[in-house]
């Protein structure tokens, strides 16, 4: 079974600074997808960014980018120019890309990000 | 922009009672999911549903749970006899043609409190 680990329960960053959230995962599969979801105080889960394992290029979405190290099974999220609205719980998630997968997401424990003005 | 909706936003029930949580997925989506999040813990997969049947379920999803798509728009999660440990946030999600390529869109969640 796949597992996802986020070793940083809490992180903080100053507004306009850069912060990196860590995530490692364990799988024996070669085809899979990785995601970062944001959960603000409203509790709504919002997709931030995704990475296909077969792509070597790291995904980027505006101020959000990932550092995907497939061999190390590491998938960190970098938030540049942090804004107050980035404050939330961030979850790393794994999804199998196999033919029998129906899209089940396996989540990490989450990292609470605080942004200081 | 299309979105997943869930009702009610908060449900309080007594232990042993049955509850039904409702979700309206995005209209052209074919894959549906339920997840739960106990306060302060990670989000856990419960069940996936496709073509009017369960395609995958977790160990959490025991005989007390059931899902149904009673009409063309609603997707429900029923807990037959609630326990205190069922208190959690329940999220519905849906995805389009194939869950492999398309991300899951989550609803705002239903907070279930069992007393």
Image (tube, grey):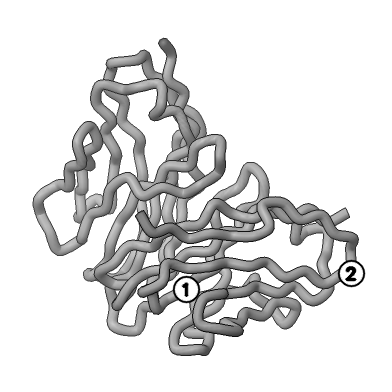
* Residue at the farthest top position: A117
Number of numbered discs visible in the structure rendering: 2
The answer to whether residue B62 is above or below residue A32 is below
Residue B63 at x, y percent in the picture = 72, 82
Q: Which residue is mark 2?
A: B16
| Contact, mark 1 vs mark 2 (Cβ under 8 Å) | no
How packed is label 2: few (under 14 Cα within 10 Å), some, or many (20 or more)?
A: some
Residue A11 at x, y percent in the picture = 44, 26
Left/right placement of residue B43 relative to residue B30 reads right
Q: Which residue is mark 1?
A: B32
Q: Nearer the viewer, residue B95 or B61?
A: B95
Q: Could you tell me which chain the residue with mark 1 belongs to?
A: B
Query: Circle 1 — which element?
Result: strand
The answer to whether residue A5 is above or below residue A27 is above
Q: Could you tell me which chain the residue with mark 2 belongs to?
A: B
- Quarter the N terminus of chain B occupies: bottom left
- Quarter the C terminus of chain B occupies: bottom right
Residue A102 placement: quadrant: bottom left
Query: Circle 2 — which element?
Result: loop
């Amino acid at each position: 079974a796949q597992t996802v680990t986020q070793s940083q329960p809490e992180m903080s960053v100053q507004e306009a600074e850069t912060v990196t959230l860590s995530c490692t995962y364990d799988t024996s599969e070669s085809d899979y997808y990785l995601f970062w979801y944001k959960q603000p105080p409203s509790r709504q889960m919002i997709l931030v960014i995704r990475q296909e394992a077969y792509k070597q290029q790291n995904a980027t979405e505006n101020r959000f980018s990932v550092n995907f190290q497939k061999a190390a099974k590491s998938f960190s999220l970098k938030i540049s120019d942090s804004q107050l609205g980035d404050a939330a719980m961030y979850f790393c998630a794994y999804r199998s890309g196999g033919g029998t997968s129906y899209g089940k997401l396996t989540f990490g424990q989450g990292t609470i990000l605080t942004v200081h003005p | 922009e299309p979105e997943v909706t869930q009702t009610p936003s908060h449900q309080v029930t007594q232990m042993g009672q049955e509850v039904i949580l409702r979700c309206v997925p995005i209209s052209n989506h074919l894959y549906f999911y339920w997840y739960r999040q106990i306060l302060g813990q990670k989000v856990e997969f419960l069940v996936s549903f496709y073509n009017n049947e369960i395609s995958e379920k977790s160990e959490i999803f025991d005989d007390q749970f059931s899902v149904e798509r009673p009409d063309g728009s609603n997707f429900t999660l029923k807990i037959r006899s609630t326990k205190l440990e069922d208190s959690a946030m329940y999220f519905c999600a849906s995805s389009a043609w194939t869950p492999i390529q398309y991300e899951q869109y989550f609803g705002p969640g239903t907070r279930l409190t069992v007393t």
